Image (tube, rainbow, N blue to C red):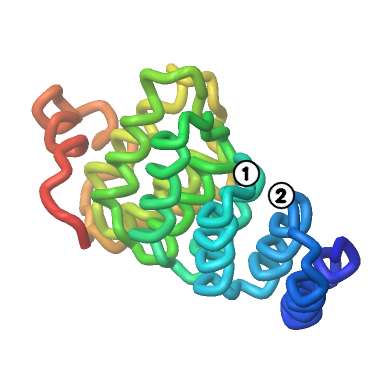
Amino acid sequence: MAACERAGDWEMALAVLSVMLVARVMPDTISYGSLISACEKAAHWQLAVHLLVSMCSVDVVANVVTFNAAISACEQRGRWPVALALLGTLNDRMLQPDMVSYNSALSSCEKASCWQPALQLFTDLAPGRLRPNAITFGAALGACRGAWQQAAWLLRAMPAERVVANAVCLGEAAEAFERGALSQPLAGVLGALSDADIATALRVEQHC
């Protein structure tokens, strides 16, 4: 099963699982995790989620790594509602999401250019035990394409989190400003943002 995972050969991994079930060998967390990871590598999100649900239904313990693989599979296809639902299930099961969990969920919003749920997820993360990193900001900025006020707020939030804007973050921010038809220079916009602007940036009105 581990070899199938490394190769991303989900079909062979599924065949191995079927043989195990026929032989009345109960797959464990590692077996299911390897299969879900193989699905992740192939971006086969439906099967990854189905397997995660199946393992929970037969009382096989799913851990954060297993959930992360399923969230990542959804992320690759931009299936942000499913990714966020899986993230919520982690909390419901009293499992602690890590930065891989949050960054994958944010990236799913980025791929769908859905800034509202991305910013909601970002603000949910801020008061907690985890600190956003450059990947977090890059994904959130990528979700804000065309939403220049939100992108500006994210840029201003980076120093407080001790995160240095890298090429990815700056590139995503530049695209947000360009698509937002922004006429002012970037420096002027960042300096002119008021508390009201920040409140607007944080307001999540409705899903995409």
Q: Which residue type does callout 2 highlight?
A: Thr
Q: Give the image location of residue 116, x and y in percent.
A: 24, 49
Report the disc number at residue 29: 2
Looking at the image, which residue is at 74% across and 52% down?
28
From where the camera sits, is residue 8 visible? no
Q: Quadrant of the C terminus?
A: bottom left
In which quarter of the view is residue 47 placed? bottom right
152 is higher (above) or lower (below) than 29 = above
Q: Give the image location of residue 83, x and y in percent.
A: 43, 55
Mark 2 or mark 1, earlier in chain: 2
Q: Quadrant of the N terminus?
A: bottom right
Q: Nearer the viewer, residue 8 or 121?
A: 8
> Going by the image, does 13 lie left or right of 80?
right
Category of crowding for the residue at label 2, using alpha-carbon neighbours closer than 10 angstroms: few (below 14), some (14–19), many (at least 20) = some
Kindly give the residue lying farthest to the right in the view shown. Answer: 3
133 is higher (above) or lower (below) than 23 = above
> Going by the image, does 184 lie left or right of 68?
left
Q: Which residue type does callout 1 highlight?
A: Val
Q: Nearer the viewer, residue 123 or 22?
A: 22
Report the disc number at residue 61: 1
Category of crowding for the residue at label 1, using alpha-carbon neighbours closer than 10 angstroms: few (below 14), some (14–19), many (at least 20) = some
Looking at the image, which residue is at 57% across and 33% down?
98
> Going by the image, does 159 lie left or right of 156?
right
Q: Nearer the viewer, residue 43 or 167?
A: 43
Kindly give the residue lying farthest to the front in the view shown. Answer: 24
Q: Give the image location of residue 132, x and y in percent.
A: 50, 30
Q: Secondary structure at mark 2?
A: helix
186 is higher (above) or lower (below) than 194 = below
Does the residue at mark 2 contact the one at mark 1 (Cβ under 8 Å)? yes
